[in-house]
Image (cartoon, rainbow, N blue to C red):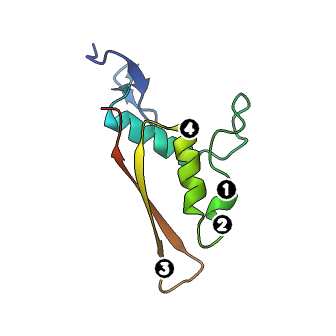
Amino acid sequence: MSSVMVPHFLFPFQLNGNAFAVIEQDTTQEVQQCVEILLLTPTDSRLVLPDYGTPETLFTQLPVNVSAILAKLNNWEPRAAVALTQTLNTINEMVSYIRVNVIGGTS
């Protein structure tokens, strides 16, 4: 039996014995997970929420539009306080690294 009061599925889905792994809603781990899912979900991929997600074009144009990513995160995951940093690859100028740090949350 889990001690989680308000369970949310763990991402990626995992089985613990005969039950799915869960995390507690509104924990820092759950907020981080929601940020990750938002960034990995292409816009228009959810029929019920077509605006949810991140446009793939944000990651194909350099430099990456960090303010657009922050706007998406603020809109869809207001519980997260995030810091984004962008580093250009010194060997291949067609590559940029984006690091998203969730520096705060609701708990």
| Residue named by callout 2 | 60
The residue depicted at 42 percent of the width and 41 percent of the height is 80
Sooner in the amino-acid sequence: mark 1 or mark 3:
1
The amino acid type of the residue labelled 1 equals Glu
| Residue named by callout 3 | 89
| Residue named by callout 1 | 56
Q: Quadrant of residue 56?
A: bottom right
Q: Residues within 10 Å of mark 2 (few under 14, many from 20)?
A: few
**Which is more toward the observer, 63 or 59?**
63
Q: Is residue 21 above or below residue 88?
A: above
**Residue 40 visible in the picture:** no
The residues tagged by marks 2 and 4 sit, at their Cα atoms, a distance apart of 21 Å
Q: Are marks 2 and 4 in contact (CB under 8 Å)?
A: no
The amino acid type of the residue labelled 4 equals Trp
The residues tagged by marks 1 and 2 sit, at their Cα atoms, a distance apart of 7 Å
The residue depicted at 57 percent of the width and 40 percent of the height is 75
Q: Position of residue 3 (x, y in %)?
A: 25, 16
Q: Position of residue 70 (x, y in %)?
A: 53, 52
| Residue named by callout 4 | 76
Q: Residues within 10 Å of mark 4 (few under 14, many from 20)?
A: some
Q: Position of residue 10 (x, y in %)?
A: 41, 32
Is residue 80 left or right of 63 when viewed as pictured?
left
The residues tagged by marks 1 and 3 sit, at their Cα atoms, a distance apart of 20 Å
The residue depicted at 60 percent of the width and 56 percent of the height is 68
**Which is more toward the observer, 54 or 20?**
54
Asked which secondary structure carries label 3, the reply is loop
